[in-house]
Amino acid sequence: MRAVVTVIGKDNVGILHKVSGVCSDMGANVIEVTQSVLQDMFAMIMLVDITDMTEDFSQLADDMTKLGEKLGLSIHTMHEDVFNSMHNI
Amino acid sequence: MLNVYNILETIRMIQDECLDIRTITMGISLLDCIDTDIDRACEKVYGKIVSKAGNLVAVGQQIEKEYGIPIVNKRISVTPIAMLAAACPNENPVKFARTLQRAADTCGVNFIGGYSALVHKGFSPGDEALIRSIPEALDVTQNICSSVNIGSTKSGINMDAVKLMGQIVKETAERTADRDCIGAAKLVVFCNAVEDNPFMAGAFHGVGEPDCEIHVGVSGPGVVRSALSKYPDASINELADIIKKTAFKITRMGQLVGARASELLNVPFGIVDLSLAPTPAIGDSVAHILEEMGLEMCGTHGTTACLAMLNDAVKKGGVMASSTVGGLSGAFIPVSEDAGMIDAAVAGVLSLEKLEAMTAVCSVGLDMIVVPGEIAPETISAIIADEAAIGMVNTKTTAVRLIPAVGKKEGEMLEFGGLLGSGPVMPIKEKSAAKFINRGGRIPAPMHSLKN
């Protein structure tokens, strides 16, 4: 099972570190990261393996949302199935 | 294979374009709760609903988090209560309504639908008792919805029921006049009612359905409008293609949520209803989709054609995305719940007559329309009869949900707030149809050959 974490907002020091920190605290393995910075806007998409996670998926989603609020970023955590079912026949 | 563009598109749909799952609705059969002792029947009803749907809200919230998409409402639909009321003819059916309210409170759901009767060919004693109790039932409860089916293509229109419903709609509004006539907003009169509708106020669990199942209603007018806005110069058939693709994506989300809910609740998956259901929020309006297609304002000439195309394209895209499409499926046009429709009605561009024409080509019917409080019951009945005739002849579901605004006149506003929105009191014809309505009887079923 995999989750997709998207982070959008103003660039700042240590965003990747903090987001991946939440993942590692719960035993979620970061598989792939795509990131771009356009002027001062930061956009990152992170693919995370949640199979062996120590907490519930909802806990990960909650913690990411809280982190986003703290950093002034928009962070979404969604199950991979959402994208697969929506964009593939 | 995940693609950055697709991921961002999905997030934008949810965050900026109001994409949501409008409802997960659990349909529960109450046929095994029928009892000649109404108190015993009520206990069985309460017990069954709570045992089946006790987890519904928690599961809904879990899926919301898992998939990151809002599920706006968690609801329950039940077997038409008239069937239970028939077993205890000397009792007041409002006891069932209070029981449903108690179950709704315990389960924490937004609505329970099914305080209903199916009388398209005639009344049984339970049906008539239930219909006459609707004003009281909707007055003493908050989360119970009621519907009555008064006609069908196969059986014609029960004009005695049409006459009675005119009185019931008015009485319901009057009994809840202190609460913006909210009772009438929870009462729908149908022709060709469907048995697996997850949307309120018309949801009930048909007798042909299994013991318990999960339906999902998707929404997303904002997503469709936004998709169309990127192609200002596209031809109509190109627009139809864009709508189909968008409807496909929206419906896939519904399918995913429904399948997951069914798995978590261990209840069979019923249907996905792929209706575009507007809310009063800016950017969540069906009228604005029509305006995006090129109308200066919804309700002007060309509206019916635009809506027909939209409705058809939504179905074509949605059917491909789910193996079990059902319910009402199409575009809803509830006036008070749609920011664009409210504006058009206030401006006088969207009239009752145009809405009636629009209902011939889209989902449902004359929905959430505020009429003057002094409207005669026979006039309400006549509006119901007109709308039912469109449904009967065109083999489609039509419905009427009128709100007589007690104490208000044409042009004044009735404010409900929340998802129900607000609406201007719309003008109605002054000439009476009372003689026609008072004749009673039945409009025979239409023939289905020699179609012209």
Image (cartoon, grey):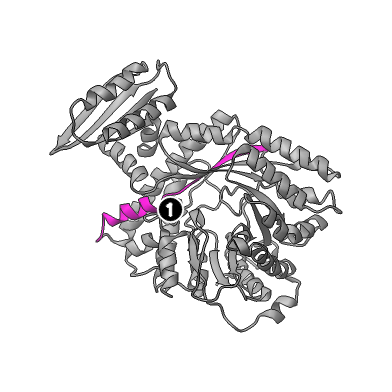
Q: Nearer the viewer, residue B293 or B42?
A: B42
Please check the rendered image and state whether residue B399 is part of the magenta-colored stretch, yes or no. Answer: no
Measuring from the top left, give residue B79's x and y in whole percent: 70, 46
- Residue B208 in view, yes or no: no
The image shows residue A24, relative to residue B397, as above or below, that is above
Q: Nearer the viewer, residue B359 or B17?
A: B17
Q: Quadrant of residue B348?
A: bottom left
- How many numbered marks does the figure carry? 1
Residue for point 43% across, 27% down: A58
Residue reaching furthest left? A39
Q: Is residue A14 left or right of residue B207?
A: left
Q: Quadrant of residue B285?
A: bottom left
Measuring from the top left, give residue B281's x and y in whole percent: 41, 55
Residue under circle 1?
A: B314
The image shows residue B129, relative to residue B409, as above or below, that is above
Residue for point 23% across, 22% down: A17
Please check the rendered image and state whether residue B225 is part of the magenta-colored stretch, yes or no. Answer: yes
Given the image, what chain letter belongs to the residue carrying mark 1?
B
Please state which amino acid type lies under the numbered disc 1: Val
The magenta span reads B211-233
Of the 4 image quadrants, the one containing the C terminus of chain B is: bottom right
- Residue B102 in view, yes or no: yes
Q: Nearer the viewer, residue B34 or B315?
A: B34
Q: Quadrant of residue B252?
A: top left
Disc 1 packing (10 Å; few <14; some 14–19; many ≥20): many
